[in-house]
Image (spheres, rainbow, N blue to C red):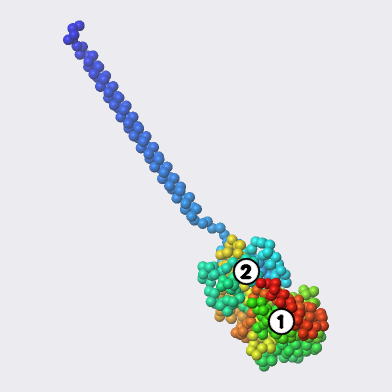
Amino acid sequence: MSRGYKNPRIPIMKNNRKSDLTRSYKFTIMEGILSFEEEVVRRKNFSVFMLVMFIIAGLIIFVSCGEKKPEGPVHVIFYLWDDPAYEPIIKAFNDAQTGVIVDAQFIPTNEYEAKINTLLAGGVEMDGYMQKRSTDIFAHYANGYLAPLDDLCKKYNFDLNAIKGYKSAITIDNKTMAIPFRGASYYTYYNKKIFEQAGMATPDTYVKNNEWTWPRFIEVSKSITAKLPDTYGGFLYTWGSNNVIPALQNGMQFVDADGNLDINHTLINCYKYRKELEKAKAIMPLTETKVTKTHYSKAFYSGKVGMLIIGEWFPGFMIKGRDENQLEGFTWNDWSLARIPCDESSYRTFGNPTFSHVHINSKKKDAMFKFISWMGGPEGATIVAGSGLLPAYVTDAVKNEFKKILPDDTALAYYTEPVTVNTQFYNKYGSKVESELAAIMEEYLGADMSDAQLQNLIEQRLKQVAEQIQ
């Protein structure tokens, strides 16, 4: 085979194979590239898909966390005493809205002051409570039990100006520490049937003639008992304040805010008045009232008491007595009320408003405030009036409500008349002063003591109070 000889088939075959291989390789490479690109696209799309899903999931979680699911009403623990007028007020609030439920913890009336102080000192869980002995606000403030309410009043637009008449009673160090829901006043509640049986004029007659003084009250009480021997002409309860009413009407502070004694002979007369009434058996003796634990409402319900000197809340007890058929020997229309006796030149009664606090340690201060501000505001005022109580917040609706719950026009006129109301024992010494005066009364009734001896004893005890409380 010469060098120049060429087999035409082989080159063609080689060239064709090489071309085919090249094309094959190119196709393979291209397919790989395309497959790789597709994989890249696929994976990229998957990553984008997953990223989108993560974003969506994150948004769902964020929205879920941001939106508060309905949790139902907030329950608050509120302590108060077992006044029959209070349960309808609690129920009315719980029924009127769905955001807050008041879990009322009732304590017997005659045990309340001691027990609430024990509960507060012991750190028992509570969101709020009523203050029964209003002067205890000073000790409770000093002990750090009370939450200031000014910020809450602003937050919920509670109108403090509507109850400005009670501002001094609820303010300490320029801070609002309570919301009052009951006003303050004392009245002479009387059984018209007893006066009819005794053939005597009712107290409102003496009021109209400007003759309703404490000596006149003693005279009328003694006359009733003389004519109806099984009946007490009057009834004065055991509280220290109820036994020194003439001194309170006189504006006496007993121990003033600076720790100085502030007494005069009017206080001596208070002790003498009670002793004279007990000696004539015209009122139930103080010791008997305490030993038998006779509540003033039960005494009046019995139909054996001509007159009861007690506060503005008593119509609520009369409603309860009527509804539970506890009135003995007389009916709803057989009682009324008038002013209390007064020895001053111009009439004045006495009393402190009844108010409620939010506890400093409550985790539900807003919810607790919603209740006590409702009770002390225009909505609650109508319910309070309907329960037989004089609300701190008086509206036309309140006055109309009283027409339904008082027995006659005489009662309505005296219950709603604007009069001067002196506060009682209203400083940091007040609670202790009241307790000491009550203790002195018991000692005085059981002893033969001259006016001078009584005054010396009072001065000695009150000086001790001033020294003990700085």
Disc 1 element? loop
Q: Is residue 281 visible?
A: no
Can you tell which of label 2 and label 1 is closer to the viewer?
Answer: 2
Q: Give the vertical position of 272 relative to 104 (above or below).
A: below
- Nearest the viewer among 291 and 425 is 425
- Image height of 209 relative to 159, above or below: below
Expressed as whole percent of the image width and height from the top left, the position of residue 104 reads 65, 66
Q: Within 10 Å of the Cα at label 1, are there few (<14), some (14-19), or many (20+) other Cα atoms?
A: many
Distance of mark 2 from mark 1, alpha carbons? Answer: 26 Å
On-image quarter of the C terminus: bottom right
Quarter-of-image position of residue 294 = bottom right
Q: Name above or below for residue 47 compared with residue 410.
A: above
Q: Amino acid at mark 1?
A: Val
Where's residue 96, x and y in %?
57, 68
Q: Which mark is residue 244?
A: 1
Please tell me in which quadrant of the rendered image residue 408 appears: bottom right
Rendered-image quadrant of the N terminus: top left
Q: Is residue 418 visible?
A: yes
Read off the residue under disc 2: 141
Amino acid identity at mark 2: Tyr
Tell me the residue at 71%/77% (across/down).
463
